[in-house]
Amino acid sequence: MFNWTLRAPQDGVVIGPEERLPWPQTCILGLQHVVAMFGSTVLAPVLMGFDPNLAILMSGIGTLIFFTVTGGKVPSYLGSSFAFIAVVIAATGYAGGGGPNPNLGLALGGIIACGACLALIGLLVMAGGTGWIERLMPPVVTGAVVAVIGLNLAAIPVKTMAPTGFDAWMQALTILCVALIAVRARGLLQRLLILAGLLLASLLYALLTNGLGMGRPLDLSAVAAAPWFGLPRLAAPVFETRAMLLIVPVAIVLVAENLGHLKAVGAMTGRSMDPHMGRAFLGDGLATMVAGAAGGTGVTTYAENIGVMAATRIYSTALFVVAALVAVGLGFSPKFGALIGAIPLPVMGGVSIVVFGLIAVAGARIWVENRVDFAEPRNLMVAAVTLILGTGDFTLRFGEFALGGIGTATFGAILLHALLGGRR
């Protein structure tokens, strides 16, 4: 598992998962993967009221678990999953604002249950093969489910993260900062559009508020007072049936995300990742369970890091061991957590609008890349109904329990596609 074949650095040479560059280059490239995952891995826990320090720590531990379970065969970083945001907010009644979630335990119980469900799916795939997963979740279904995640979350930054007129304009300015970096920047800076846009918008916010008195000033006193080293805030799970029923369906979304990751890596490396699919599901499931048990968010394979691999053509799993160890170190720095907490709410809201929009577009990209035919009535109905169920937060009640939003849309997409299978 740790026996990588050493390859000398050469321009244009593809480095496979079982290979590595000399350790100095490997460490530098591993740091790049930390930066790539950083923005989203921190943003998701902030939106749910989790401790971002702990989320970073558990993302590193989760990545090491994934590496071990897959035998070091699948290059991937596991970061905070956005698929949990809507269901965690519904289960806990979290009102946002960046503070701690008072009902965090309810979310953690559901996250552990979701991880267990994903791990079970992994064991079933290992025992029975991958064909049934791809038949159950063809591209029309996975694309709709991924798109719904972004659409369902849209109201959070728009309705709750801009309480004043100035904040709304600041959100718009943040969106512009991220968009300009995405379009005008080149190289690594373009890959870091979320982090770079957030930093630029925060500087502009400080200029407008602290400098010109337009709104609530940026306060860094907590950053100055925080120690460099310390333990993150651990939390205990609470296993409540309603919360678990809301959160467990996210396992289907995690299957879709992992499936897409494996297909993307397989296409880039020219080697099939299907033999590792079951272990990938199992690794992600176990990592999510461990994260939830400590107080962290559920985790998933990260598209941001796929982008870095595509740009560098280096797929060595050694990079992700380095990245995971760095993330674990960052998790033990309260000063780092205080810095995250100091990010202005409207800036975080503007970044959220971009991120949620990118998630929605990622679902449409699955349709385009797989040439989903919307002239076929079944595909049209599955996509149309799923998008509206998820965006409108359609809720089905079973006595005192309720299934809404992403859960209803996910199960609805799978069931509708299966039920309409006999008609053309």
Image (cartoon, helix red, strand yellow):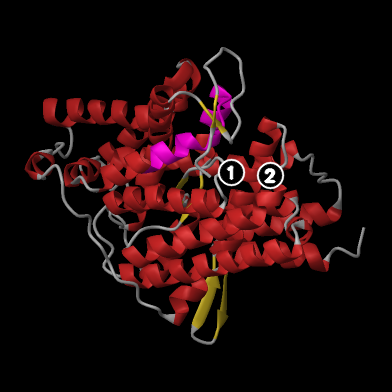
Any magenta on residue 122? Answer: no
Mark carried by residue 218:
none
Image quadrant where one finds the C terminus: bottom right
Q: Secondary structure at mark 1?
A: loop
Mark carried by residue 74:
1
The residue depicted at 27 percent of the width and 43 percent of the height is 329
Residue 235: x and y in percent read: 27, 66
Label 1: few (<14), some (14–19) or many (≥20) C-alpha neighbours in 10 Å: many
Q: Residue furthest top?
A: 11
Residue 130: x and y in percent read: 74, 57
Residue 238: x and y in percent read: 35, 76
The residue depicted at 12 percent of the width and 39 percent of the height is 219
The answer to which quarter of the image holds residue 291 is bottom left
Magenta residues, start to end: 306-324
The residue depicted at 73 percent of the width and 49 percent of the height is 139
Q: Does residue 151 sit above or below 313 in this rendering? A: below
The answer to which quarter of the image holds residue 27 is top left
Q: With 148 as the anchor, is 154 left or right in this view?
A: left
Q: Does residue 1 sit above or below 244 in this rendering? A: above
Q: Would residue 268 be visible to someone looking at this image? A: yes
The answer to which quarter of the image holds residue 195 is top left
Q: Would residue 180 be visible to someone looking at this image? A: no
Residue 331: x and y in percent read: 27, 47
| Residue holding disc 2 | 273
Q: Which SS type dominates the magenta stretch? A: helix
Please name the amino acid that badge 2 sits on.
Met
Please name the amino acid that badge 1 sits on.
Val
- The tag earlier along the polypeptide, 2 or 1, is 1
User: Quick check: marks 2 and 1 in contact, CB under 8 Å?
Assistant: yes
